[in-house]
Image (cartoon, rainbow, N blue to C red):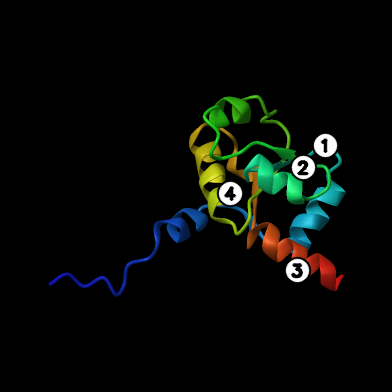
């Protein structure tokens, strides 16, 4: 009988290798870097409902996702988010593995949902 009690979900393992920022720090970093790129990797429908100001939409689920990501300037700091943080973890991991410098990629912890909650408090 296999013991699965200690298995860590893969997304948590991937997340451990990324630069993860809670919502307030994410917003502060975006505000302090006028040349950064903010990428929303949710679907266009999710993006249309609401998004972080100044964000561009590159859907993680789009067929040309990687082609669009490769068009980003790797010299700029890139802030990535999705709804809850899982797609953005995968996107950031792909970016890291695809040649983007890890020091320039930041993932929003808790995604847009947590960001909205935190911004309402401010």
Mark 4, Cα crowd under 10 Å, few <14 / some 14-19 / many 20+, is: many
**Nearer the N terminus, badge 2 or badge 1?**
1
Asked if residue 22 shows in the view, the reply is no
Mark 3, Cα crowd under 10 Å, few <14 / some 14-19 / many 20+, is: few
Q: CA distance from mark 3 to mark 2?
A: 18 Å
Circle 3 SS class:
helix
Callouts 1 and 3 close, C-beta under 8 Å: no
Discs 1/3, front: 3
Q: CA distance from mark 4 to mark 2?
A: 14 Å
Asked if residue 93 shows in the view, the reply is yes
Q: Could you say which disc has been placed on residue 55 in the image?
A: 2
Q: Give the residue number, with chain letter if any, for mark 3.
A: 117
Q: CA distance from mark 1 to mark 3?
A: 26 Å
Discs 4/3, front: 3
Q: Give the residue number, with chain letter if any, for mark 4.
A: 88
Q: Looking at the image, which residue is at 83% across and 73% down? A: 121
Closest to the observer, 121 or 75: 121
Q: Quadrant of the N terminus?
A: bottom left
Closest to the observer, 122 or 75: 122
Report x, y in % for residue 83.
Answer: 63, 55
Circle 4 SS class:
helix
Above or below — where is 62 with respect to 42? above
Q: Looking at the image, which residue is at 82% across and 42% down? A: 54
**Nearer the N terminus, badge 3 or badge 2?**
2
Q: CA distance from mark 4 to mark 3?
A: 18 Å
């Amino acid at each position: 009988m296999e013991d699965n009690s200690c298995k860590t979900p893969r997304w948590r393992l991937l997340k451990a290798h990324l630069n993860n920022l809670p919502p307030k720090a994410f917003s502060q970093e975006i505000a302090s870097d006028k040349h950064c790129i903010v990428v929303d990797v949710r679907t266009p429908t999710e993006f249309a409902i609401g998004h972080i100001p100044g964000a561009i939409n590159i859907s993680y689920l789009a067929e040309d996702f990687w082609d669009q990501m490769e068009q980003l300037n790797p010299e700029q700091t890139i802030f990535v988010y999705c709804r809850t943080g899982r797609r953005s973890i995968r996107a950031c991991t792909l970016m890291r593995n695809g040649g983007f410098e890890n020091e320039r990629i930041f993932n929003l912890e808790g995604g847009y949902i947590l960001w909205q909650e935190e911004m309402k408090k401010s």
